[in-house]
């Protein structure tokens, strides 16, 4: 019989490894999210890069430890950058964040095609998941069929692969009032993938760390404006004891 | 005889409707302003989207309740996105923010052509208005000729249509030291257009709400860096009593 | 014999001139850095513009007092905007910030070609300098060969031309955890070039001012999230006495 997993230890370990190894995360992401995403990665100890230039993206991905593919800006330049990035990423972990695919059929179709390239994790909210998976089945089936991890964020974050499921109950409603919070969270998750080979554990760790940081930040914030900076501060300062004391999973 | 309008009640009502109805505002705006604009809309209770992809912009506009057209990034991609957005926006309120047209004759000419598409409101500063209206006449004549509302922002904000004029005396000089404050204000005004059919009232309400939030924020800010977040907080937390106590119109 | 230069006086004077003259700085910079760069320029008293549209960039540069060329987004649109901007900038000071050229050979080659257009200052970190100057020689030789000023930022900032060298020891490690801090610093330096004809003095002044602002900001910050706003506040509020008391050069 296995001992139960100590998620507080795992999450704190993943964060400690990001801080000590400073993984490079190449982010193909939307223009709204770029600055906040870079700041969250820096606060966690990772090193962001963001280019989508066709002449450079392969070189940046080759030097990176993980790749984030976010569909929030869906222009032809980014679509070809994604193709080049994934070709260069062979063997490296990468995350798909199919932003707003429920609002755009073309974007949803593009996201479904990207599943063939084997994302380590797909992070999305429930509306996006419904657009990505027309079967209407549970995320476990989707994860099994596509051999990936599904990280469904919302009031509770649920992370599943074919055999494991966990709900993370941390976080704060203010997180939904800061633009690019989800995108930046996907970037943090990508950094976790760079230091933790088990993609399910990496996803659990990153979402738990961000949720706990959000709770800490909310206690001192006067609204979404101060909260946006406070969660970066809280992520930067998060220690093992505070993380353990606050983590709520089920 | 009509009772005089109670602008404190109107402004608070418009904000309350944004908070309860969560209107979708599609923003074609410049890359400098995207993040701040999205955060201001979220703090007010609206739902921003930002895509300019030719394959998607019509779908996003179709699902939106109001549209913002900001000329701060003036590239060919945005120009064609604007044309597609306005074609899809038929009947929906939209706002024109002709950023920096006094610095670029081509941009000014483009802005003048957009007037033919019937913006509900044109929001701009005095230098931009002088470039938009070569007649040098008062904004009332311009508003009448183009059947629109002119929201002239500056030390005092002046909102006119063909028959009504008001000056809003709230605000703080720090608002001029945060980039994209005007652009984000235009987005807030667009959200107001989504919940208030009288475009003049919507403009008055949105500029008054932002000006009062700016005054509250300035009291606690140590400079433009903290002010940028504080005004978002103040907008998020603004209540009817504080708004009424501070509103200054003439 | 010359009296030794009073760098506290020089730095405070340059900042005072930026505040009183409000120089226009046209920035061709990456999308990650645009917002933060604009906010830093505004806090210092300068007026930013950012367009890269081929139909407009010459008009904006013609109306500007200094130009910033930052390679952090390296797309074909920006490359042609740079060519147009430098053609229009004849005689005006301009700064080259060759972001991340150590990660991309094409970007490094492009940066080396730009040296022929005579930048007033090249601001970069040590890894970028090694990629820019394959000779491995000291920055003084590079500055002499290219008749420019080299501003090497890092734990200490070193500013050299062919005959002068200074190290600025102010600053705080949190500056490295805010994305676009270096890019925004280059913009501040460009504003200094607009008001100080001696490019070496302008570089020393701008980096010293930013370093001192960073130290002040770090004292009140809880992490990189609050620090990002606090350094803008500190720059905005910096006075001659505080600058003199903290400045450390050698």
Image (spheres, coloured by chain):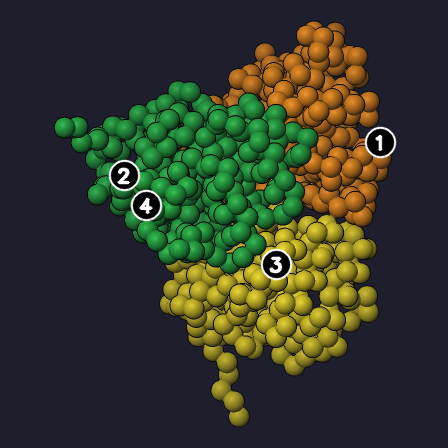
Chain colours: A yellow, B orange, C green
What chain is tagged by disc 3?
A
Of mark 2 and mark 4, the one earlier in the sequence is: 4
Q: Which residue is mark 3?
A: A57
Q: Secondary structure at mark 3?
A: helix
Q: Is residue C89 visible?
A: yes
Closest to the camera, between mark 1 and mark 4, is: 4
| Element marked by disc 2 | loop
Please tell me how crowded label 2 is: few (under 14), some (14-19), or many (20+) other residues with Cα within 10 Å. Answer: few
Q: CA distance from mark 1 to mark 4?
A: 64 Å
Question: Which residue is at 42% across, 35% downward?
Answer: C120
Q: Nearer the viewer, mark 3 or mark 1?
A: 3
* Mark 3–mark 4 distance (CA, rounded to whole Å): 33 Å
Residue at the spot 79% in from the left edge and 12% down from the top edge: B145
Can you tell which mark lies on residue C164?
2
In this rendered view, identify the residue nearer to me: A3 or B29: B29
Occupied quadrant, residue C123: top left
Q: Are marks 2 and 1 on the same chain?
A: no
Kindly report which numbered mark, 3 or 2, lies closer to the viewer in this rendering.
2
Q: Please tell me if label 3 and label 2 are on a single chain.
A: no
């Amino acid at each position: 019989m296995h001992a139960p997993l100590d998620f507080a230890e795992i999450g704190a370990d993943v964060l400690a490894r990001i801080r000590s190894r400073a993984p490079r995360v190449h982010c193909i992401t939307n223009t709204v999210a770029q600055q906040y995403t870079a700041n969250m990665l820096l606060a966690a100890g990772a090193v962001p890069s963001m280019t989508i230039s066709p002449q450079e993206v392969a070189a940046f991905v080759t030097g990176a430890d993980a790749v984030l593919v976010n569909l929030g800006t869906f222009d032809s330049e980014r679509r070809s950058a994604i193709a080049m990035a994934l070709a260069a990423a062979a063997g490296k972990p990468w995350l798909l964040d199919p932003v707003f695919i429920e609002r755009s059929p073309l974007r949803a179709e593009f996201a479904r095609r990207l599943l063939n390239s084997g994302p380590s994790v797909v992070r999305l909210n429930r509306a996006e998941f419904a657009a990505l998976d027309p079967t209407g089945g549970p995320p476990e089936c989707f994860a099994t069929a596509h051999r990936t991890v599904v990280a469904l964020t919302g009031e509770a974050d649920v992370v599943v692969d074919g055999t494991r499921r966990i709900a993370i109950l941390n976080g704060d409603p203010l997180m939904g009032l800061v633009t690019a919070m989800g995108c930046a969270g996907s970037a943090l998750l990508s950094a976790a993938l760079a230091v933790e080979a088990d993609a399910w554990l990496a996803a659990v760790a990153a979402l738990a760390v961000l949720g706990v940081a959000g709770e800490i930040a909310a206690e001192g914030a006067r609204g979404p404006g101060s909260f946006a900076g406070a969660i970066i501060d809280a992520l930067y300062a998060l220690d093992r004891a505070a993380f353990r004391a606050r983590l709520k999973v089920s």
